[in-house]
Amino acid sequence: MVSTAPLRQDERRNLDLARVLLVDDELASRLTLQTLLEAGGYSVDVAASAAEGLDKLDEQEYELVLTDLHKEFAGVGPELLAYARVKAYKPATALVTAYQDSKSFPAPLLDEHEVSVQTEDVANLLGKVAGLISLRAARRAERAVRQG
């Protein structure tokens, strides 16, 4: 008989799921995104502040780091992503936004490395996440070939 009970957090970690760090200072948004990502098959660690996110980046390796703009301090989200990108394990990064269209998104806050994932676009959210993680894997394989 196959169990239909949801997996516990420690059981999900044992499945070698792609690890995602979600850093969002808004509880409702954080819980919603965490639920969506876990339903999509990802192992998700969450942080409620940029400081907590930085600690997690130093403690664990992630395939993807998602963060919002953070209302706690202006510019913290992009700075967190910049910090993640210099980690030796090179996670994919994306800025998560609730803005519904690119015209209202504050483009000067994004640099050429940052991708905007709109939370309102639930239908495409998991596809974008999968694409970012696949791109990271391809880049890592390319680097390994060049070095090996």
Image (cartoon, rainbow, N blue to C red):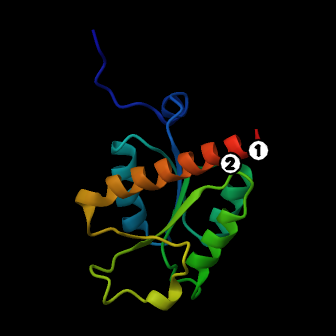
From the viewer's side, name the closer residue of 112 and 142. Answer: 142
Image location of residue 44, percent across then percent down: 49, 48
Residue drawn at point x = 69 percent, y = 42 percent:
144
Q: Which residue is mark 2?
A: 143
Residue 27 relative to residue 90: left or right: left
Residue 11 relative to residue 4: left or right: right
Residue drawn at point x = 60 percent, y = 80 percent:
76
Q: Which residue is mark 1?
A: 147
Q: Residues within 10 Å of mark 2 (few under 14, many from 20)?
A: few
Label 1 close to label 2 by CB (< 8 Å): yes
The N terminus - image quarter: top left
The amino acid type of the residue labelled 2 equals: Arg
Image location of residue 18, percent across then percent down: 51, 42
Name, please, the residue furthest toward the left. 123
Q: Secondary structure at mark 2?
A: helix
The amino acid type of the residue labelled 1 equals: Gln
Residue 72 relative to residue 124: left or right: right
Image location of residue 140, percent across then percent down: 63, 47
In the depicted structure, whether residue 28 falls above or below residue 43: below
Image location of residue 80, percent across then percent down: 63, 71
Report how many numbered discs are placed on residues in the image.
Answer: 2
From the viewer's side, name the closer residue of 7 and 98. Answer: 98
